[in-house]
Image: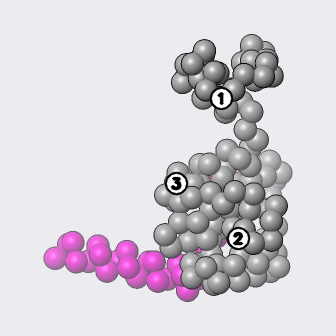
């Protein structure tokens, strides 16, 4: 572990690290350096087949953490016992999603438990699509 983290500080370029240590070791070094919220965003990007918004919390014009075909996703992670979903947080992601013509979604991880939060109307619409497809397959 010390060797991998120590390697990151020697001033090598990404290309040199990749050549020197190979993909597997370099990938492990990246995983060690990533913060938990970064890992969560990366995982959500893969899970929702979306694209991460660079510096989404750092600039006024960048909305949401991840954008997929249908959703504007706010990715949240905590190691506490819970996470408070306030009306202010929901209104923020809802308004941003509306402007982007997407459905708002909060992807939340509390320790090892993952869940999604979405508007009831959006859920019912998705549920209706799901049940309609399953009924047509069973005929």
Question: Which residue is pictured at 62% across the width and 62% down the height?
Answer: 66
Compared with 64, 15 (above or below) is above
N-term-proximal mark, 2 vs 1: 1
Q: Which residue is mark 1?
A: 14
Q: Label for residue 94?
A: none
- Ranked by sequence position, the earlier of labels 3 and 1 is 1
| Image-based side of 132 in relation to 29, left or right | left
Mark closer to the chain start, 2 or 3: 3
Where 35 sits versus 109, above or below?
above
For this rendering, which residue is in front, 137 or 15?
A: 15
Q: Residues within 10 Å of mark 3 (few under 14, many from 20)?
A: few
Residue 53: give x, y in percent of width and height. Answer: 66, 60
Secondary structure under the numbered disc 3 in the rendered image: helix
Residue at which label 3 appears: 47
Q: Name the residue carrying label 2.
A: 63
- Above or below, 50 against 99 in this view is above
Label 2 residue SS? loop
Magenta segment: 110-139
At label 1, counting other C-alpha atoms closer than 10 Å, the crowd grade (few under 14, some 14-19, many 20 or more) is: few
């Amino acid at each position: 572990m010390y060797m991998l983290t120590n390697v990151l500080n020697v001033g090598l370029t990404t290309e040199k690290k990749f050549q020197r240590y190979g993909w597997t070791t370099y990938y492990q070094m990246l995983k060690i350096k990533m913060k938990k919220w970064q890992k969560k965003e990366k995982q959500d990007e893969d899970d929702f087949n979306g694209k991460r918004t660079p510096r989404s919390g750092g600039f006024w014009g960048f909305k949401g953490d991840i954008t997929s075909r249908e959703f504007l996703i706010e990715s949240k992670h905590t190691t506490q016992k819970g996470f408070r979903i306030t009306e202010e947080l929901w209104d923020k992601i809802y308004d941003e999603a509306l402007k982007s013509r997407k459905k708002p979604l909060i992807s939340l991880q509390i320790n090892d438990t993952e869940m999604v939060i979405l508007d009831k109307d959006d859920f019912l619409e998705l549920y209706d699509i799901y049940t309609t497809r399953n009924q047509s397959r069973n005929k």
